[in-house]
């Protein structure tokens, strides 16, 4: 009897580890659901919008200008950022803020990308911390999940 209990317990642990490894690989290499916070990507992505991020593109170095990506924050590695790719390595980008009178330009170094939020007045991005290493990009946003709440009212007439 004790042998049967141990056998079932170890089988359950084995299945848990197997499915845990499969889930880890799926979220690490295929993608996952992300809840975005902050106003830096408005109006494209609102605060608390739910998006799906696929990770294969960044593993194959296939990020393009205009893509919205999830990356590790260069100034705080514990948090992620959601920004649009403005420049790839070798591109010339405007490095000054929108309020500056004189515009300055620089080139994106090899192995880096230039990230900016769509809401330029309310975004901490590459204009503040410079080009972002390609290795910090975790995934590319594929689509936004839209939830529609349908409230139905019932009127009863007598």
Image (spheres, rainbow, N blue to C red):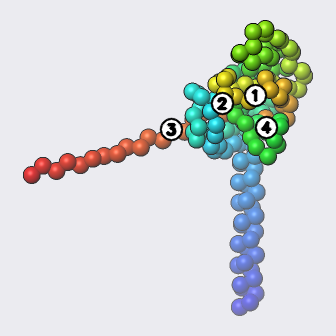
For numbered disc 1, what is the local secondary structure? loop
Residue pointed to by mark 1: 125
**Can you tell which mark lies on residue 33?**
none
Eye-nearest disc, 3 or 2: 2
- Indicate which disc, 4 or 1, sits on the residue closer to the N terminus: 4
For the residues labelled 4 and 1, the Cα–Cα distance comes to 9 Å
Residue pointed to by mark 4: 73
Residue pointed to by mark 2: 40
For the residues labelled 2 and 4, the Cα–Cα distance comes to 13 Å
Residue pointed to by mark 3: 146
Number of residue marks: 4
* Label 3 crowd bin: few (<14), some (14–19), many (20+), radius 10 Å: few
Q: Looking at the picture, does residue 5 appear above or below residue 127?
A: below
Q: Looking at the picture, does residue 107 appear above or below residue 68?
A: above
For the residues labelled 1 and 3, the Cα–Cα distance comes to 26 Å
* Label 1 crowd bin: few (<14), some (14–19), many (20+), radius 10 Å: many
């Amino acid at each position: 009897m004790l042998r049967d209990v141990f056998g079932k317990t170890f089988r359950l642990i084995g299945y848990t580890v197997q499915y845990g490894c499969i889930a880890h690989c799926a979220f690490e290499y295929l993608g996952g659901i992300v809840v975005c916070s902050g106003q830096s990507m408005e109006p494209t992505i609102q605060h608390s919008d739910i998006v799906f991020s696929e990770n294969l593109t960044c593993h194959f170095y296939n990020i393009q200008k205009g893509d919205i990506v999830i990356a590790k924050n260069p100034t705080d590695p514990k948090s992620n950022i959601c920004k649009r790719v403005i420049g790839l390595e070798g591109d010339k980008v405007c490095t000054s803020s929108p309020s500056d009178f004189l515009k300055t330009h620089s080139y994106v170094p090899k192995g880096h990308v230039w990230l900016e939020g769509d809401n330029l007045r309310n975004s901490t991005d590459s204009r503040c911390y410079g080009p972002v290493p390609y290795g910090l990009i975790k995934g590319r946003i594929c689509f936004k999940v839209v939830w529609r709440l349908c409230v139905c009212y019932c009127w009863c007439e007598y």
